Image (cartoon, rainbow, N blue to C red):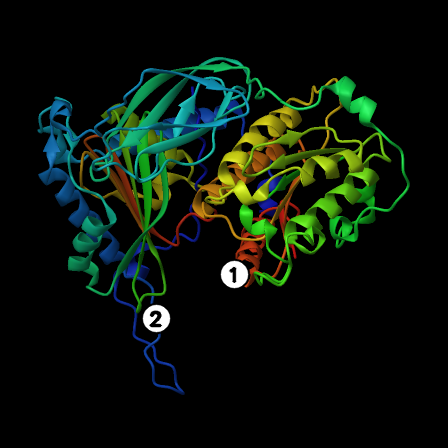
């Protein structure tokens, strides 16, 4: 049941005869301009009469009233916790743009957007259980209301199967060295951040263009001089980063390759990571550079973990996603949509006082100006929403 | 405001008399011609989108008006929209609010509720407007029920919307 409470109050009542007569026209003495005046009271009555006449002309029986057409392809839906979901009407003719819902149990599901012109309702599933969602609609012209109920079953989300070294193997790889964190990873950050037990996840662009020299000019660097290529630089940086992270038991590092799909989790040895990266044949990785699939996959793995806060093996860690690439993605719209959904989820969690720290950092390797412009745009778009959510470094 | 805070909370007797006054005022607001109208339930199919409202109001206020949707609330029992009407040579904004209810009884409850929100006794500031089924007007507002619709027109509108 929904209770709506509206509070109105009226003030400054005047005797009707004060405003019944048109107010004398006043002019600005200096400019001779006619000043705005109050609305004469008789005009309010005239407006009311005009509207009532319009209403009376269109009186019909309840059966004849124009009701919103509601056509839903589903009556029940199974969704997973920690994920947004949409219910879309198949008929959207003459519907009022405001499309709220009435949710039986708002601890399980919440609506995250007030409907859309194309008839979509967007929700977010928070807890496992069963509830009912009433999709409410109004006719755009007659304002008559209607609704459709959908039964929702929310099931516990299971993170995707993780491949790569098992925890025991990872522990065997661990080494201890003492070097500071690379400056690119900590620049412009609060000093306190170094103390945070981050889960650092690097998404590394391993497409063939990474084999080009740092300045982008083909032929300047021979394949033998891999250190001078973008890939060579990345390998060194990740080697350095992994060695430094191994110093701390708190911070973890996972690496995912964008194109070949290889992944290593909880890396504790920079040298081994370097050797693994050097074995990647980036020349074969020709194709489009899509960040959306890997971003979606990573958010599915890590964000529910953060939201549940019950990662007993490692403890819950804030997520620092670093995307290292030499170009802008080909699937910009899809990636931005994912970031938008993530922002919405974080905002909702913040509303229920559940702070989840996620930051996404794009690191540009090389001198691609268009890509730099694009990542700056992303930073301004999502960074403004949440200062640390998206940032850019080149 | 100070006087409101200083005054004691209304007693049960005050509330009962207020309730009685609202009921009396509501009865008084009934349009005489409406009594003779058929009693079966009626609704409206009148188009009340901003464009239609603009066209309706232009015939009274002039062509230079602008109608904008300020607020909309849709629940499974009602749809309420608030339009703002601006006119360059008028220094007040006119507000029009439509509440399309499921039943006429719900619309009547809205009107009673609106009357109860008056800071002063409704009988001192409102009088019948003779439109729709029930209607009242004040110096700066007109509100009435037509079928399942509760409509309000006012200037210097409620603060805080």
Residues A317 and B111: in front is A317
Q: Secondary structure at mark 1?
A: helix
B86 lies left or right of A172: left
Within-10-Å neighbours for mark 2: few <14, some 14–19, many 20+: some
Residues A324 and A52: in front is A324
Q: Judge whether residue B36 can be spotted in this image.
A: yes
Residue in the picture at 32% in, 41% down = B81
Q: Secondary structure at mark 2?
A: loop
Dot 2 and dot 1 within a common chain: yes
On screen, residue A1 above or below A237: above
Q: Residue tagged by mark 2?
A: A36
Residue in the picture at 55% in, 15% down = A156
Where on the picture, by quarter, is residue A314? Answer: top right
Q: Residue tagged by mark 1?
A: A370
Asked if the residue at tag 1 contacts the one at tag 2, i.e. Cβ–Cβ closer than 8 Å, the answer is no
Q: Position of residue A215 (x, y in %)?
A: 62, 62
Residues A275 and A237: in front is A275
Separation (CA) of disc 2 from disc 1: 51 Å
Where on the picture, by quarter, is residue A197? Answer: top right
B62 lies left or right of B98: left
Dividing the image into 4 quarters, which one contains the C terminus of chain A?
A: bottom right
The earlier-in-sequence mark between 2 and 1 is: 2
């Amino acid at each position: 049941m929904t209770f709506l409470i509206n509070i109105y109050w009226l003030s400054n009542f005047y005797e009707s005869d004060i405003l019944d007569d048109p107010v004398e026209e006043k002019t600005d003495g200096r400019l001779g301009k006619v000043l705005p005046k109050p609305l004469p009271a008789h005009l309010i009555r005239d407006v009311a009469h005009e509207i009532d006449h319009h209403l009376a002309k269109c009186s019909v029986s309840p059966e004849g009233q124009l009701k919103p057409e509601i056509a839903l392809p589903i009556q029940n839906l199974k969704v997973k916790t920690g994920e947004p979901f949409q219910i879309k009407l198949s008929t959207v003719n003459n519907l009022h743009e405001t499309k709220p819902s009435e949710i039986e149990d708002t601890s399980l599901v919440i609506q995250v957007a007030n409907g859309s012109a194309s008839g979509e309702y967007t929700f977010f599933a928070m807890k496992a259980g069963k509830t009912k969602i009433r999709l409410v609609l109004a006719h755009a012209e007659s304002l008559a209301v209607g609704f459709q109920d959908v039964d929702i079953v929310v099931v516990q989300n299971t993170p995707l199967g993780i491949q790569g070294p098992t925890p025991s193997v990872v522990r065997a790889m661990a080494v201890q060295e003492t070097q500071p964190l690379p400056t690119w990873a900590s620049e412009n950050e609060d000093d306190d951040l170094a103390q945070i037990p981050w889960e650092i996840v690097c998404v590394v662009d391993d497409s063939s263009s990474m084999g080009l020299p740092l300045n982008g000019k083909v032929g300047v660097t021979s394949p033998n001089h891999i250190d001078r290529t973008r890939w060579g630089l990345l390998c060194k940086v990740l080697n350095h980063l992994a060695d430094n992270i191994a110093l701390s038991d708190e911070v973890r590092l996972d690496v995912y390759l964008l194109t070949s799909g290889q992944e290593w989790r909880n890396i504790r040895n920079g040298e081994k990571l370097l050797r693994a990266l050097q074995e990647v044949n980036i020349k074969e990785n020709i194709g489009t550079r899509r960040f959306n699939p890997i971003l979606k996959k990573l958010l599915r793995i890590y964000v529910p973990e953060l939201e549940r806060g019950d990662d007993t093996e490692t403890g819950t860690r804030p997520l620092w996603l670093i995307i290292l690439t030499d170009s802008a993605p080909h699937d910009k719209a899809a990636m931005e949509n994912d970031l938008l959904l993530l922002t919405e989820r974080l905002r909702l969690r913040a509303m229920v006082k559940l702070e989840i720290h996620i930051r996404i950092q794009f690191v540009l390797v090389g001198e691609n100006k268009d890509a730099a412009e694009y990542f700056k745009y992303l930073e301004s778009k999502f960074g403004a929403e949440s200062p640390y959510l998206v940032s850019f470094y080149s | 405001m100070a006087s409101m805070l200083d005054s004691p909370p209304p007693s049960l007797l005050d509330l009962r008399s207020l309730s009685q006054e609202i009921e009396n005022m509501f009865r008084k607001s009934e349009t005489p011609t409406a009594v003779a109208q058929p009693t079966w339930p009626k609704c409206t199919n009148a188009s009340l989108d901003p464009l239609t409202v603009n066209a309706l109001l232009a015939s009274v206020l002039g062509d230079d008006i602008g109608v904008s949707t300020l607020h909309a609330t849709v629940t499974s029992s009602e749809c309420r929209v608030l339009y703002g009407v601006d006119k360059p040579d008028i220094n007040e904004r006119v507000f029009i609010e439509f509440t399309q209810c499921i039943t006429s009884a719900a619309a009547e409850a809205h009107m009673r509720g609106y009357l109860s929100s008056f800071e002063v006794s409704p009988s001192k500031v409102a009088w019948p407007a003779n439109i729709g089924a029930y209607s009242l007007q004040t110096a700066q507002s007109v509100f009435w029920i037509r079928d399942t619709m509760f409509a309000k027109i006012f200037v210097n509108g409620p603060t805080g919307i």
